[in-house]
Amino acid sequence: MSEAGTGGESLLFLTDEQLRKGIEAMFFAYRGFTADPDRILSELGYGRAHHRAVHFINRRPGLTVNALLSVLGVTKQSLNRVLRTLIADGLVESRVGKSDRRERHLRLTERGAELERRLSEAQRARMRAAYRAAGPQAVAGFRQVLEAMMDDEIRAQYLALRDTQS
Amino acid sequence: MSEAGTGGESLLFLTDEQLRKGIEAMFFAYRGFTADPDRILSELGYGRAHHRAVHFINRRPGLTVNALLSVLGVTKQSLNRVLRTLIADGLVESRVGKSDRRERHLRLTERGAELERRLSEAQRARMRAAYRAAGPQAVAGFRQVLEAMMDDEIRAQYLALRDTQS
DNA sequence: CAGTTTATGTCAGCCTTGTTGACTTTCCAA
DNA sequence: TTGGAAAGTCAACAAGGCTGACATAAACTG
């Protein structure tokens, strides 16, 4: 795994050693990525699962339980537990669907939106600092590698969501 | 990436919208990042915690429980449970410290090393594909952003480990 | 209209992996 | 030599995954 490559480009960045550094960087960076929201959440007695639900409900207001399920990649029983507490606490509202009354459409209440802003601002602040430190070109590369790392199915979901207005 | 900015550089990459895309990319990519090892682990009745322990024991053979604890960022009780099963299953060996007999020094057995190779090769394969697809420049940016995203303390640990031979 | 499928919710029970508290063994310093 | 600190272990609890079974309501299909 080394030395000069085909196409006149070095392949040194594909050595096991380089890959290992990337793997460890991913592991440690993800800890930082979730650290700030985690602190806020634990004050309120919530966990990461609540954050994820709130995030995607904010992103697609009115989405159905089923849609949320498939974005999050968890079972309905697992999501339901989280959703139940968010609804009981008045952060999420569940409305019966107009055209299909079996569906429940989810949206954040004003209080839910407030929590969402608090969580996402904390997460953005760290991201902003990292982006600023690394510069625009690094950020473009960062996004490229992450997108290439996703499962095909997940990437399709991500791309469909990516350029959507919230 | 265009426009004029302070210092002659565009700041469009720091908009909330761009940050949000990065946050979601991180979320979905991490799922892909762990997906392959997770499949192998669940066949064997292990979880991600076992993977992390095996990874870092392989990286620093002979490290103490305490050292492993601080790399992983969990409590010793939590780690102990995982370690106990790995030792019972003959994947990890625990030796009483020579100079300080309170310490336990951990290393992989041959079977443990075999599992480690299987797990890390699966993870590297995905990483390699992503790196190859994105190219060396993107990879450099990827690493820069990840490093900037870590907590200061964690980054120090990561950097100390980064260029160490395993 | 009867029967089936779909969307959702709920209960029960299991597992992994985090937590805190209490305890033992060992080391070291006063 | 004794008391505290450090390393590790055991016990018990909680969050949040999972599966399986089942209920309800609404929609769809023959």
Image: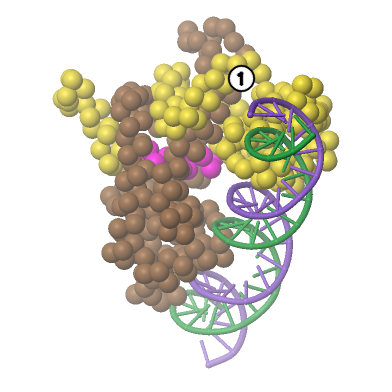
Chain colours: A brown, B yellow, C purple, D green
Image location of residue A93, percent across then percent down: 36, 69
Q: Is residue B142 visible?
A: no
Q: Is residue B22 magenta?
A: yes
Seen at 68% across and 45% down, the residue is B77
Image location of residue B132, percent across then percent down: 51, 23
The subunit carrying tag 1 is A
Question: Which residue is label 1 attached to?
Answer: A16
Per the picture, the main secondary structure of the magenta-coloured stretch is helix
Image location of residue A77, percent across then percent down: 57, 65
Judging depth in this view, the residue of B90 and A157 nearest the camera is B90
**Where does the N terminus of chain A fall, quadrant-wise?**
top right
Image location of residue A161, percent across then percent down: 37, 48
Where C13 falls versus A140 (above or below)? Answer: below
A78 vs A66, left or right, is: right
Magenta segment range?
B21-32
Where A30 falls versus B144 (above or below)? Answer: below
Seen at 41% across and 44% down, the residue is A36
